Amino acid sequence: MRTVYRTCPLCEAVCGLKLTLDDDGQVTDVRGDREDPFSRGFICPKGASLGRLDEDPDRLRAPMVRDGDGWREVSWPEAYAVVERGLGAVPGPARAIYLGNPNAHTMAGALYGPAVARALGTRNVFSASTADQMPKHVSAGLMFGHPLTIPVPDLDRTSYLLMLGANPLESNGSLCTAPDFPGRLKALRARGGRLVVVDPRRTRTADLADEHVFVRPGADAFLLAGIAHTLFAEDLVRVSAPVNGLDEVREATSDFPAEAAARACGVPAEVITRLARELAAAPAAAVYARLGTCTAEFGTLTQWLVDVLNVLTGNLDRPGGVMFPRPATEGPPRRKPYRTGRWHSRVRGLPEANGELPVAALAEEIETPGEGRIRALVTIAGNPVLSAPGGGRLERALRRLEFMVSVDPYLNETTRHAHVILPPPRMLQAGHFDFALLGFAVRNYARYSPPVLPLDGGPAETEILARLAMIAAGQGADADPAALDELILDQLLRDTPGDRAALTGATGAERRLDAMLRLGPYGEWNGGTLSLRTLLDHPHGIDLGPLEPRLPGNLTTASGRIELAPAPILSDLVRLRARLAEPAPEFVLIGRRHLRSNNSWLHNVDPLVGGSNRCTLQIHPADVARLGLAGQARVRSAKGELVVPVEPTDTIMPGVVSLPHGWGHQDSTQAVAAKHPGVNVNTLTDEDVIDPLSGNAVFNGVPVILSTAGAE
Ligand SMILES: Nc1nc2c(c(=O)[nH]1)N[C@H]1C(S)=C(S)[C@@H](COP(=O)(O)OP(=O)(O)OC[C@H]3O[C@@H](n4cnc5c(=O)[nH]c(N)nc54)[C@H](O)[C@@H]3O)O[C@H]1N2
Ligand SMILES: Nc1nc2c(c(=O)[nH]1)N[C@H]1C(S)=C(S)[C@@H](COP(=O)(O)OP(=O)(O)OC[C@H]3O[C@@H](n4cnc5c(=O)[nH]c(N)nc54)[C@H](O)[C@@H]3O)O[C@H]1N2
Ligand code: SF4
Ligand SMILES: [Mo]
């Protein structure tokens, strides 16, 4: 028996875990790590099942090559040779890559994912970001100069939190890394603060709040514009940050007085004006909006309005407001003007954002003949058949690829279309550092978990991706993956006094982490103390203090000021104004998350499936009665049709129905998941409708028509 400490890799909360392992390396117990200064012992049911997940007998243990209708286990050299032949037959511009969500959690994804994308020599780069948070990146890029300059609510010090489209009691938070998010919300209330939740469903988070406000799906931008209008009209604007464009914002929001906003979003005008006054009066307030507001038609406008409100109320960059974290691996600021649309997708002409094209365009780029058609695809840690809008169409498109390789531990709805699957080793065989998520943490904090178990023959995922990059770059499957690390280290250390020989680390990934830590804001080569060594000496993590004001130093706009009224945003407001006059559809579909699920891939772990975690259609009882629904409902959208069990509940607004995503495991070879298949909600979502500024998918506010489908 031995005890090890490790960061949970499953969600953005980065909880510290205490694992007990037996002599065979099996996990016998999982607890929260009480000595972690950030998570302080918090754990959720997913983290508690980490051992079960890691030891899932259905995880792939060896590379698989498709052989007619079946699969054949092959050696690693053989698998790489197949990849080399497959990719080699397709020129760069006809290749594509899809990077899924876990790349934000793994060291391999952070350190080698971008290298694979570059090596493929294509602009067909897709990721889960355009099914998620791209609107926030675009808004941050336009306002603050860099898509990662994203302020987070200062949860532990705020006295007023206006939260829209987030449900951290199930999700544990997103773009706001806060282990025990529920406890932090309770603490906010206990110290006399106020929590207001805006959501078309009365969620568990709404139940915990002081106030829950129902909003029509997709209509948050009206609500926020109405609040901004009130702030101007009642002379409550108190800007303390350096901004350009204040007058333009006043002018731009002048068409959204509370009454007009109320008609469009369903929130009463008096609530809109009251929220504005409360935000202005609070000693420190934060507006925070997440997934429900990003995956919507006015996604980028909404994210922009969120930070406009934070600026107008003087809450940007002040304790208790929204603040910019300073992560331990932060590099020097890059002063390059931010813009989107540097290139466009071939078929629909959709603009690039952050170097990516919208995943909503992936299917058509495979289907549509012509030069540059996607003929080969690499997927890493993604399941876009279940997660991308129009997933059913995408599944059919994948069958037309000449070559597909997936890096994934599971044979699933997406990877079954691959020609080769390259499985990473067990999670406990990988080191863990949250390069991405610590940049959104509500306290500055760092923690590194070295591998708990040694590799047993197969490569680390870092090596798999490094080899893929080298194959894609034409260097062949036998090239030395370490050369890639050395190349990247050369670039990293080019302008710095650091002594390369001083770097420690058992692997290239660790050496690169060491270099980034040493060069970072708390680093040994920067007047501080941090290095890989320091983190290894502190297995529970290191608290680097509360968030501190960073303006204007962290702004990278050309003006050096916050651009409150970027031109692309002002032009897109035309669309919002036009919508003021349009009638709403009778029924719209939204999503939801369950605590014991995680997108599409925790459904093969027995303790996590079943119970309340089910793929049902939530609908208001009055709508059930009016439509005469019983048992099952038929749900039709512009793109597809599903039959689903009805779950009447008065926690959802009339006229709104909700289905979770990540289900649809019919014919799965995963034994447990196959018993709880559910349906793929993304059969209903529409890949032709996107947020135009970011290209983001629209999952919330999808018009649907309901009818009865009889007993379950
Ligand atoms: N309708 C609707 N659709 C949605 C959403 C919604 O709310 N509604 N949410 C969207 C959001 S926010 C997201 S982030 C996307 C997610 O979209 P995806 O990332 O495409 O989907 P996931 O289900 O997260 O798939 C993760 C995959 O990674 C694999 N995996 C797990 N761990 C590892 C690892 O360590 N290495 C590798 N190589 N693979 C690993 C899993 O087996 C799984 O196949 O879905 C989006 N889709
Ligand atoms: N247990 C669990 N945790 C997860 C995940 C998971 O699948 N399961 N996925 C992870 C991922 S990839 C992400 S991105 C995060 C997301 O984490 P969150 O941002 O917290 O997202 P959700 O939990 O989906 O909550 C979104 C809420 O938005 C509401 N909503 C829908 N439409 C609208 C709208 O138009 N306006 C408003 N105001 N609200 C709306 C929904 O009812 C829902 O309550 O969670 C992460 N954590
Ligand atoms: S909240 Fe997230 S990080 Fe924490 S234990 Fe649960 S899944 Fe893991
Ligand atoms: Mo996500």
Image (cartoon, rainbow, N blue to C red):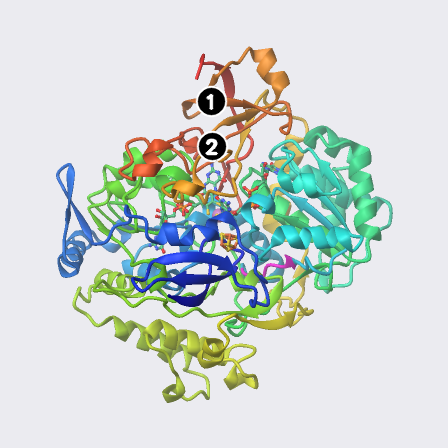
Is residue 382 visible in this depiction of the protein? yes
Residue 363 in the image, given as x and y percentages of width and height: 34, 38
Instruction: Give the number of the disc on residue 645.
Output: 1
Instruction: Decide which of 14, 466 is in the foreground and name it.
Output: 14
Q: Magenta segment, which residues?
A: 148-152
- Residue type at numbered disc 2: Arg
Tell me what residue is drawn at x 25 percent, y 70 percent: 481
If you read the primary sequence from the N terminus, does the residue marked by circle 2 or circle 1 appear first? 2
Q: Compared with residue 80, is residue 251 higher up or lower down, i.e. above or below?
A: above
Mark 2 vs ligand 2: CB below 8 Å: no
**SS label for mark 2:** loop
Instruction: Decide which of 344, 204 is in the foreground and name it.
Output: 204
What count of labels does the image hold? 2
**Which quadrant of the figure contains the C terminus?**
top left
Pointer 2 with pointer 1, Cβ within 8 A: yes
Image side of residue 172 versus residue 563, left or right: left
Residue tagged 2: 614
Image side of residue 347 versus residue 311, left or right: left
Image side of residue 458 versus residue 312, left or right: left
- Callout 1: 10 Å neighbours few (<14), some, many (20+)? many
Q: Compared with residue 508, is residue 623 higher up or lower down, i.e. above or below?
A: above
